[in-house]
Every structure is written in structure tokens, then in C-alpha cells.
Image (cartoon, rainbow, N blue to C red):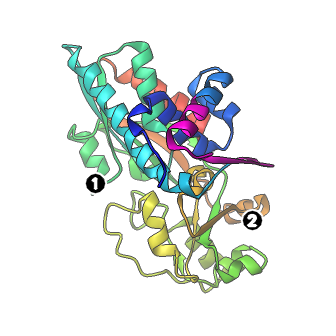
Amino acid sequence: MKNMTLDSLDMLSANILVNLYEKHSASSVAIEMNIPAPKVSRCLQQARMIFNDPLFIRKKHGLEPNEFTRQLYPLVKALVQCGEQLHQLELCHGMAASHNMVIYVSDLLIAHLPQRLSGAISEAQLPISYELRSGSADIIEDLAQGLVDLAILSESSAEGLQDSRLEVEPLKQLTHLYLLCSLNHPILHQEISLANIAAYPYLSAFSQIDKQSPDPFLRYCRQQKLACHLAPTDLGLEGLGFHQLFRYLSDDKTVSLLPYNKVYEQSELLPGLHVCCLSANDTERLYRDQAYPRLYLLSARQHGCSHLDWLRQEIRLLISQSVH
């Protein structure tokens, strides 16, 4: 058994360990966390001493976590998230006029949102706390009733978002598509094309507000008279979560397409699944006769929080830097 002294692990080293696992690059972590690269190296060395393990193996493409680190990662990730929540609690406790904001965003969409948003709030020294939600039976009504302050949504058209009670701001167009399937799926031994994807049970996971609006891939299949059929699910009204993907895609039969780069960039967190970017030609072909999906930022027109405009600006910046 390893001689571990977990009580010696400081929050900075824990945060660096999590980011190294997700980014595979010390220089990328230094830029992301805005700290000197030598400090990243020192904290990694400290973590190696604490756990009595090398933790990462340097390979051609970057730092690769070993098996021990794969087991350690979810525990340290939870520790970092708890630390962020404690920081938010401390910040709110010390400021009398604190505003608690509720932000809706699918966890399929964007990684590091809590970490970066918390950092921006702390740097600006604003009395804002927030809660993230990824499920809602009717997000439009939740916004209008003040149950949710801001929502980040992906839609093929803004028509389903039109409501006189809401401010709707278009953000970024999503111009990539990512194929998801199991590591042993037979499609990986074929040419990956739209026609071949249509030959397998398809998991529709775009999570659009208008439940009657067809998934863009299903619409393409109907236009091209491809016999695509849906895989059975029990997703209900609140849609699909990031960590549910394995449940529906691990059968070596089902495939899915998603427009969110998070599923590609964090595919190492989906053990047993393969994620790859569809070719530009296939993506353009699919969207030739329909609109690309776009991200929208929504809030109620009558909103009393004085910091809402600042929060909207930070989310715009975060989306522009982190989503493609």
C-alpha cells in the first residue's frame, strides 16, 4: 500500500493535478490558471511526493496519467469542487449585499465553467454567488418566473426562444460535429460517413427546447431517405447529462452526434467511449439545407440584480474562449 499523506495536499496542487489530468500539458495548465509554469512543475513534484507515485508518464502528445492517477482523479476533482463551493460560501458570507444567481447550462456544453466563473467573480470582488443547474422541465417558464437568472441554450433556430418576457442574445455558432460510440463499435472499422452512421441505432442528444423540432441528423436522414432509427432511451424531459453518455453508447451498436467540443476535449472522462470530430465535408453536407445550431444567452427582461450585466459579459467571454 502506498504511504499517502493526503492532509499535506494543498488546494493549489489539487487544482493543478486535476487540470494536468484534463489538459495533458503543464504549459496549458499554467496559461489556464494564470500561474508561472515552474510553479506547476513544483506542485506536481509535491503531489508525487505526497502520493509516492509518478502520477503521469511523459509521452509524445503530452503528460499521460497512469492507472493510479485515473483512480485518484475523481476524488481530487470532488475535493477541488468542494473547495470552490467553500470559497463561494466564504465570499457570500463576508458581503452583506450578496446576490445568489441561478445559471442553467447543460453539462454537455462547457467544461471549467464553475472554476473560471468563480475566479472572475473573486478577481472582480463582487458580492455574487451562483448555483449551476443542468436540468429543467421548462426553462423558458423558469426564466420568466425568476427561478433561473441566466440560461445558456443551444438551438437550431431562435423561434422557440421568442417570449416577450425574455431577453434573448445570440452567442456562438456551433460548426463542428462529434461522433460518439463505444471503443469496440464496428463503425470504427468502416469509413465514417453520414450514410454509415445512419445504419446504426441513433441516440438523439441535441436537447432542443422545442421537443417537436427534429434532431439535425434525423432531419438530414429524412431528406436523403436514409433509414435511420432512434435508439430507445428513458431521458424524460430534462435531457442527457455528460456522464450518462456511457450508459447509452456502450452497447457496441448505438451512435450519437453532438455539436459540443466538451465531449471531444474531455473524452478521457468517458471510459469505454470513442469520440472523434466529423469531417468538415460531412458537417457542411448535413447543414446544407438547415441552420447550424447556435448558443443563446437568455434572461428575464424585468430582472432586479445589479450585477446581471457583468455576469452576462463574463459568460460571453467564457463562451468565446472555450466553445467551438
Task: List x then y, in percent, for residue 17.
Answer: 54, 39
Q: Is residue 54 positioned above or below 113 on the image? A: below
Q: Which of 94 and 195 is in front in this view?
A: 94
Q: Quadrant of the C terminus?
A: top right
Q: Which of marks 2 and 1 is nearer the N terminus?
A: 1
Q: Are marks 2 and 1 in contact (CB under 8 Å)?
A: no
Q: Residue 282 carries which label?
A: 2
Q: Is residue 303 visible?
A: no
Residue 102: x percent and y percent? 29, 37
| Residue 311 left/right relative to 303 | right
Type of the residue with mark 2: Asp
- Residue 48 belongs to magenta span: yes
Stretch in magenta: 43-63
**SS under mark 1:** loop
- Is residue 62 positioned above or below 316 on the image? below
- Which of the 4 quarters of the picture holds residue 162? top left
Q: Residue at x 45, y 22 (%)?
A: 120
Label 1 environment density (alpha carbons within 10 Å; few <14, some 14–19, many ≥20): few
Three-letter code for the amino acid on which mark 1 is drawn: Asp
Up-down: is 218 above or below 33? below
Q: Which residue in the structure is indicated by mark 1?
A: 138
Q: Which residue is drawn at 59% across and 22% down?
A: 34
Q: In this view, does 223 lie above or below 151?
A: below
Q: Is residue 324 shown in magenta?
A: no
